[in-house]
Amino acid sequence: MKIVDVQLDIVRIPRHTGFVCQHAIVRIHTDEGLTGVGEMSDFSHLPKYSLDAEDLRRTLKAHLAGRDPFDLAALNREMADLFPQTMYYYEKGTFIRCGIDIALHDLVGKALGVNVSRLLGGRVRDRIKVCYPIFRHRSMGEVAANVEVVRKRLAEGFDAFRLYAGQHPDADEAFLAAVRSEFGSKVTIKSLDFSHLLDWKTALRQTRRLLQYGIQLVESPAQLNDAEGLRHFRLAVDVPVSEHVWSFKQLHDLIRRDSVDLFNIALIFIGGFAAARKAAAAAEVAGKGVLIGTTQELGLGTAAQAIFGAGLTNLSAISDPTGPALYVDDITAEPVRYVDGYLLAPDEAKPGIGVDIDWDKVERLRDRSFSWGDQRVANLQDRTSPGAAV
Ligand code: GAE
Ligand code: MG
Ligand code: MG
């Protein structure tokens, strides 16, 4: 079987918060009529420049056409040469590699008539506990609306939440106090996520103030790539500390310095199944746990993350992928399923990733190019819509 063409469709989908994200749906076509489908999720992150989608498509086609999709290891290495790792969390090269890697796995699974889980060693679970995100407060005026999000999502079965914290400590505290007083132990606060916005000492002061509300863990409580700061923070608190993985060099730094308890691994931020599994194996060898992170993928990307999580032997905290509940629309024929706050892995009897795409929806949600609106840095960091209260 040979790859003959690569197609990229850009879609633009708002979230319930009003923030709009662009994603690329990848199709890898073969001479045997089989097509693998992947997702490059959420390009709407800093740095604020855009890729030329047609140029990217031609680059990918020039590299992949004529190749055998079963050469997964070689193709992955070559993609890493084309789109190298950097030390930046939202490096767009890893989003590109991830979409190609998911499409190749989907293709190989379909060619063999097996679910991607079967290619990766099977499943140790068929569902993953997840938490719903509460985006960062920037004023006291936003607290009531966020408590309402908890009320509404709890009624849908999401009983775990994570709070992006650090910009308005009084509002963070008011929110947590209100949640505890209204919902008590019915609601779990999985994490405070400081998103690298604060130095570790400031994050520590804020964490000490908020721990009384029952926080399971703290994420990214130091500036980007400050492995030393994370370690200082970790040794100063009782709760576990997690950090995202965005390059093997960064992962190695964190393991070597014993900076964290848990690694937050998402396919999109490390470049697909092969890279994510390598990172999870390194974490396991170092005696560290893993949670499945998210960029907030669409249904296809979320199903791929569920397959990754279903096979992990060191998944040890509540995970994050809730994109399909957060976006107002999706590209899958059937929605990804959440039950009692768990993300269900796709049907293991279905070949490939196990998700069908509704191509009419892709057509309806299509955008002409990757492009930015008028968002400011704070909007992009905090995932809020332009014009929202600052
Ligand atoms: O830091 C996180 O845990 C987030 O999921 C983060 O990556 C978000 O910015 C996410 C989003 O788009 O909401 O990517
Ligand atoms: Mg995070
Ligand atoms: Mg994102």
Image (cartoon, rainbow, N blue to C red):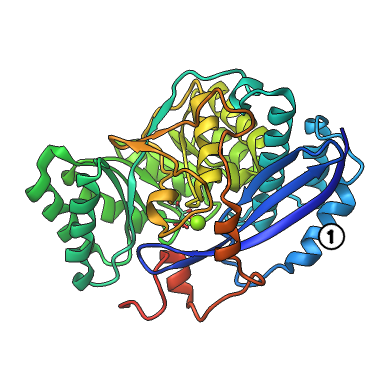
Q: Residue at x 32, y 58 (%)?
A: 165
**Residue 32, x across and y down, in percent:** 84, 35
Name the side, left or right, on which 169 lies relative to 259. Answer: left
Residue 209 visible in the current orientation: no
152 relative to 136, above or below: above
- Mark 1 residue element: helix
The residue carrying mark 1 has its beta carbon less than 8 Å from ligand 3: no
Name the side, left or right, on which 67 lies relative to 335. Answer: right
Q: Amino acid at mark 1?
A: Arg
101 relative to 226, above or below: above
Q: Residue at x 67, y 35 (%)?
A: 106
Q: Residue at x 68, y 23 (%)?
A: 113
**Residue 240, x across and y down, in percent:** 35, 35
Q: Which residue is mark 1?
A: 58
Q: Say which of 55 and 173 sits in front.
A: 55
**In the rendered image, which quarter is residue 51 located in?**
bottom right
Mark 1: few, some, or many residues within 10 Å (few <14, many ≥20)?
some
**In the rendered image, which quarter is residue 111 located in?**
top right
Q: Say which of 331 and 178 sits in front.
A: 331
Q: Say which of 333 and 125 sits in front.
A: 333
**Residue 316, x across and y down, in percent:** 40, 27
Q: Residue at x 48, y 74 (%)?
A: 377
Quadrant assignment for the N terminus: top right
Quadrant assignment for the C terminus: bottom left
